[in-house]
Image (tube, grey):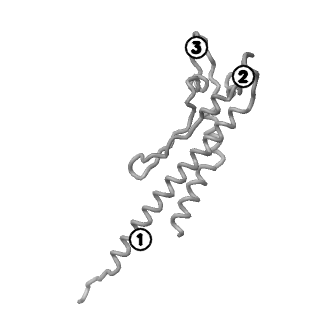
Amino acid sequence: MSGAVQITGLAQLNGALLALERDLQIATRTATAKAAHLAEAAIKQMLTTSSHPKGTPTPSNPGDPPSLVTGTLRRSTKVTGPVPAGMGRWLAEVGPTAVYGRVQELGGTAGRGAELPPRPYVQPAFERLVASGAIRSTYYAAWAAAISH
């Protein structure tokens, strides 16, 4: 057969590629969970930078994280997920469940009409984590392990 090309092992190649895709999906999910927990720890760390006794005025300056009083805001910071987000992506959410968590982060009107300035703690924690390269290295390590085994 002149000019003919014969390919063998196509079924094995297809099986290997499917296994690699599965392993990369597992690695991505695992890395997303780990990155989310890194973010949770970073946010909780931001919420321990200052404290004051209950019933005393908040000593943190506008723009600084809120001060630790009872620990409710810090304890309410949780990871949800990861869950599939389509097209091979995974989504995890990290943040407080305490009702006043948003107004502390962004500022605004609080109970009894008090206006609070922003005291961000979620965004700065995430920005530090990204700048440190911790999230990137979490994914790279997971993917490298999936590819190399």
Pick whichever of labels 3 and 2 is earlier in the sequence: 2
| Residue designated by label 2 | 61
- Tell me the SS state at disc 3: helix
**Image label count:** 3
Neighbours of disc 2 within 10 Å: few (<14), some (14-19), many (20+): few
User: Along the horizontal axis of the image, is 135 left or right of 91?
Assistant: right
Residue drawn at point x = 41 percent, y = 71 percent: 16
Residue type, numbered disc 1: Ala
Residue drawn at point x = 69 percent, y = 26 percent: 70
Relative height, residue 94 to residue 132 (above, below): above
Residue drawn at point x = 38 percent, y = 73 percent: 13
The nearer-to-camera label among 2 and 1 is: 1
User: Along the horizontal axis of the image, is 73 left or right of 55?
Assistant: left
Label 1 and label 3: CA atoms lie apart by 59 Å
**Residue 32 point in image, percent of width and height:** 53, 49
| Residue designated by label 3 | 111
Residue type, numbered disc 3: Gly
- Tell me the SS state at disc 1: helix
Neighbours of disc 3 within 10 Å: few (<14), some (14-19), many (20+): few
Label 1 close to label 3 by CB (< 8 Å): no
User: The N terminus lies in which quarter of the figure?
Assistant: bottom left
| Residue designated by label 1 | 16
Q: Between residue 50 and residue 4, name the one nearer to us.
A: 50
Label 3 and label 2: CA atoms lie apart by 20 Å
**Residue 55 point in image, percent of width and height:** 72, 16
